[in-house]
Image (spheres, rainbow, N blue to C red):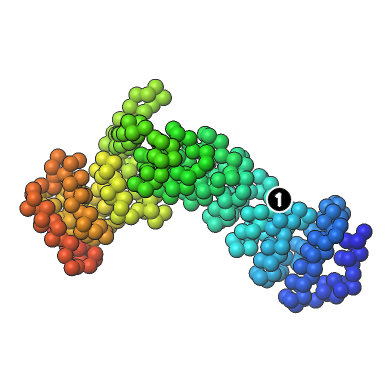
């Protein structure tokens, strides 16, 4: 066979005797070119040649330098003749080497991809979620693991074979994972019903895009948003449609877990405070503000129940809220908290004074000291 003769040719034999990185790279790439050329690819499919190639490649790759492995991965990313064992080795290599193989290799089966989701790093898992034409089996494995970054990559993969039930799970998860919302709003399989559900959790720009794309009924939008606020703040409906009221302790624990997840993922930002208030979730606002400022939750609660809105202003200034945004925050808090923090218009003016020419650190220190006396 042409391939067998080529592999045993004098030039390759000389390279095989060498231990220098340059010669090892030339040998690896030379074998690749031989297999790609002419009828080499067809010959490489035979069991005998596969066994030989497997032995050659794995033996050389085991001691190969990073750049050699990277070039080999680039060369073999779309090859149909490469030994599957070698492809799996490269797919588990460091991410810059593994990326082209995970993205394109036709030799990676669903079982191989699921193994990567279990054994490899987050970066590898994200690349699996981005792989074109991902199968339902791999999608199910991603959803079982429920890793936010990997789910977000899946949401942005418009070629993935996402069934309606899986898309609903992604939309449900978008309630807590903000990064999912933008790619899901553009997903080609998003239905009117799921768009309406997603609408309640996204920002203004995405709401406009959803409303235009699906021509959402204003009355249905109002109902969906109201229901979302009620479920988030009080509880969710059971299988019979009855609202299950979450006890205060349970709701607080759920909200604390949500904030912890957002904070750990780097998704908890000052803008989230406004969104929590707009959704009617005052206790979530309290927990989020305390987490952002590293304050005691009890101190934030005592301040919003007091007659001193300027202390709330200090806390907001400490976490990066802009002076121009604070009046809206104060109005929303008062609306959800029976008019507190009090002080009326005079108190509101005092609160704006908290946004003076001081650093966030100084504002935080001043808040902690003042909150002790409330």
| Closer to the camera in the image, 25 or 181 | 181
Q: Which residue is mark 1?
A: 106
Q: Is residue 288 above or below residue 20?
A: above
Residue at 51 percent across and 48 percent down: it is 156
Q: Is residue 236 above or below residue 354?
A: above
In the image: residue 334, left or right of residue 10: left
Residue at 33 percent across and 55 percent down: it is 269
Secondary element at tag 1: loop
> Percent from the top left, x then y, of residue 9?
90, 69
Number of residues whose C-alpha sits closer than 10 Å to that of mark 1, classed few (under 14), some (14–19) or many (20 or more): some
Q: Quadrant of residue 314?
A: bottom left
Residue at 28 percent across and 50 percent down: it is 273
| Closer to the camera in the image, 119 or 156 | 156
> Percent from the top left, x then y, of residue 127?
58, 54
> Percent from the top left, x then y, of residue 52?
84, 59
In the image: residue 70, left or right of residue 258: right
Can residue 281 be seen here? no
């Amino acid at each position: 066979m042409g391939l067998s003769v080529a592999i045993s040719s004098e030039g390759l034999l000389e390279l095989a005797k060498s231990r220098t990185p340059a010669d090892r790279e030339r040998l690896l790439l030379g074998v690749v070119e031989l297999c790609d050329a002419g009828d080499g690819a067809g010959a490489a499919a035979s069991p005998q040649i596969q066994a030989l190639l497997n032995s050659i490649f794995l033996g050389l790759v085991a001691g190969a330098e990073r750049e050699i492995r990277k070039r080999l991965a680039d060369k073999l990313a779309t090859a149909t003749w490469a030994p599957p064992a070698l492809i799996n080795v490269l797919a588990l290599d460091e991410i810059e080497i593994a990326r082209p193989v995970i993205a394109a290799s036709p030799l990676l089966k669903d079982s191989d991809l699921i193994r990567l989701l279990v054994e490899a790093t987050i970066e590898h898992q994200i690349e699996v979620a981005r792989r074109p034409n991902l199968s339902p089996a791999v999608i199910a494995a991603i959803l079982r693991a429920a890793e936010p970054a990997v789910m977000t990559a899946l949401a942005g993969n418009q070629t993935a074979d996402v069934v309606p039930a899986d898309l609903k799970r992604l939309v449900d998860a978008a309630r807590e994972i903000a990064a999912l919302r933008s790619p899901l709003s553009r997903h080609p399989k998003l239905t009117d019903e799921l768009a309406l559900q997603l609408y309640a959790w996204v920002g203004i720009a995405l709401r406009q895009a959803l409303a235009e794309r699906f021509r959402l009924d204003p009355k249905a939008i109002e109902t969906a948003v109201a229901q979302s606020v009620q479920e988030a703040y009080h509880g969710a409906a059971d299988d019979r449609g009855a609202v299950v009221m979450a006890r205060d302790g349970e709701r607080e624990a759920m909200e604390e877990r949500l904030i912890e997840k957002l904070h750990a993922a780097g998704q908890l930002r000052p803008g989230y405070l406004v969104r929590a208030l707009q959704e009617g979730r005052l206790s979530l606002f309290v927990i989020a503000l305390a987490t952002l400022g590293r304050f005691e939750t009890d101190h934030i609660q005592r301040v919003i129940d007091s007659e001193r809105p300027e202390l709330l202003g200090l806390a907001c200034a400490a976490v990066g809220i802009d002076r121009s945004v604070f009046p809206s925050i104060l109005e929303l808090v008062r609306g959800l908290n029976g008019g507190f923090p009090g002080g009326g218009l005079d108190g509101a003016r005092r609160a704006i004074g908290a946004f003076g020419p001081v650093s966030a650190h100084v504002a935080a220190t001043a808040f902690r000291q003042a909150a002790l006396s409330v």
